[in-house]
Image (cartoon, rainbow, N blue to C red):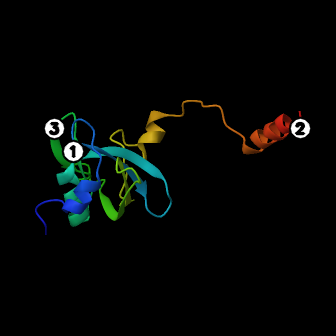
């Protein structure tokens, strides 16, 4: 098992000022977005080589492997990097709750913010009306 992250992968990452990259965690078979965590090179290396998701805890300033204390483990199915290198998509098989509140996802626990829902058909009608003027 490599002791450092593959340099070709490391070179593709665009980290924040703390050296971290956002990791969006998604249930592999349903597409459900479970949570967002943070990874540095070591957390990503562990995730890629151990089959379980490891994050860097910004509050505790330590590595944590999801599920070691709660039993709600995340088993890695795939890891992808976005086109800009500033985010990771970690597809997992989630055991139990992903959120520390006990909710299945952190986004259910956080709640809907009540955004206005867009309508593609309305936008197309508005464009046609604009063109016909």
3 left or right of 27 in image: left
Mark 3 is surrounded, within 10 Å at the Cα level, by few (under 14), some (14 to 19) or many (20 or more) other residues, namely few
> Where residue 93 sits: x, y (%)?
38, 62
Mark 2 is surrounded, within 10 Å at the Cα level, by few (under 14), some (14 to 19) or many (20 or more) other residues, namely few
Judge whether 107 appears above or below 85 on screen: above
76 left or right of 1 in image: right
Q: Which residue is drawn at the image coordinates 43% and 45% (left, top)?
A: 105
Q: Secondary structure at mark 2?
A: loop
> What mark, if any, has residue 61 been given in the picture?
3
Tag in front: 2 or 3 = 2
Q: Which residue is drawn at the image coordinates 22% and 48% (left, top)?
A: 40
Front one among 68 and 28: 28
Tag in front: 2 or 1 = 2
From mark 2 to mark 3, how far is it between C-alphas? Answer: 59 Å
- Residue position marked by numbered label 2 in the rendering: 132
Front one among 96 and 132: 132
Q: Secondary structure at mark 3?
A: loop
Front one among 58 and 3: 3
């Amino acid at each position: 098992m490599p002791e450092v992250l593959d340099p070709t992968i490391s070179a593709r990452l665009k980290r924040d000022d703390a050296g971290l990259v956002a990791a969006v965690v998604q249930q592999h078979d349903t597409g459900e977005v479970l949570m967002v965590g943070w990874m540095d090179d070591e957390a990503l290396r562990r995730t890629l080589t151990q089959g379980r998701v490891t994050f860097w805890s910004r509050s505790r300033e330590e590595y944590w492997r999801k599920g070691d204390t709660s039993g709600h483990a995340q088993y890695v199915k795939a890891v992808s990097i976005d086109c800009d290198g500033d985010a990771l998509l970690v597809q997992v098989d989630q055991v139990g709750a992903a959120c520390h509140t006990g909710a299945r996802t952190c986004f259910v626990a956080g709640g809907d913010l009540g955004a206005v829902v867009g309508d593609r058909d309305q936008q197309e009608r508005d464009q046609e009306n604009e063109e016909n003027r």
